[in-house]
Amino acid sequence: MAKTSSTAANPVSAQAGTVALPDSYEAALSELERLVGAMEAGQLPLDQLLDRYRRGAELLNFCRQRLEAVEQQVKVLEDGQLKPWNPT
């Protein structure tokens, strides 16, 4: 019987235990907020706390990269000058 790979359907990447990054900034931010809440509750064992800290660092990096990418797109749309937003 041959083994089949199901990495496309499984959010776990090739590295055991590594969860794939979310598809959107909003999903990453939501997961990050849940992680922070769980960590702040102070009820996690040390190993789980460290795992959640690592995941949080991954999510934070993802969010920062997405924000930088959007900022670059805005600069392109504004002729290279990022102008302050004026809601009025």
Image (cartoon, helix red, strand yellow):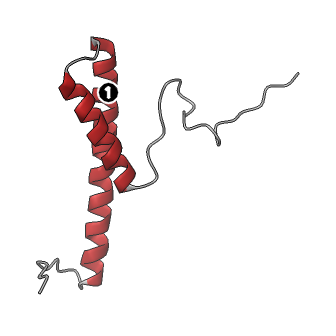
Q: Which residue is mark 1?
A: 52
Q: Residue at x 33, y 18 (%)?
A: 48
Q: Determine whether 31 is above or below 17 in the image.
A: below
Given residues 41 and 52, the one toward you in this image is 41
Amino acid at pointer 1? Arg
Is 43 positioned to the left or the right of 55 in the image? left
Residue 8 in picture, x, y percent from top left: 64, 42
Q: Residue at x 30, y 37 (%)?
A: 34
Given residues 3 and 41, the one toward you in this image is 41
How many tags in the picture?
1
Quadrant of the image occupied by residue 70: bottom left
Residue 20 in picture, x, y percent from top left: 48, 39
Quadrant of the image occupied by residue 10: top right
Q: Which quadrant of the figure contains the C terminus?
A: bottom left
Quadrant of the image occupied by residue 50: top left
Q: Residue furthest right?
A: 1
Q: Which quadrant of the figure contains the N terminus?
A: top right
Is 9 positioned to the left or the right of 17 in the image? right
Given residues 33 and 55, the one toward you in this image is 33
Is 51 positioned to the left or the right of 37 in the image? right
Q: Residues within 10 Å of mark 1 (few under 14, many from 20)?
A: some
Q: Residue at x 29, y 45 (%)?
A: 61
Describe the element under mark 1 as helix, strand or loop.
helix
Is 19 positioned to the left or the right of 3 in the image? left
Q: Determine whether 26 is above or below 88 in the image.
A: above
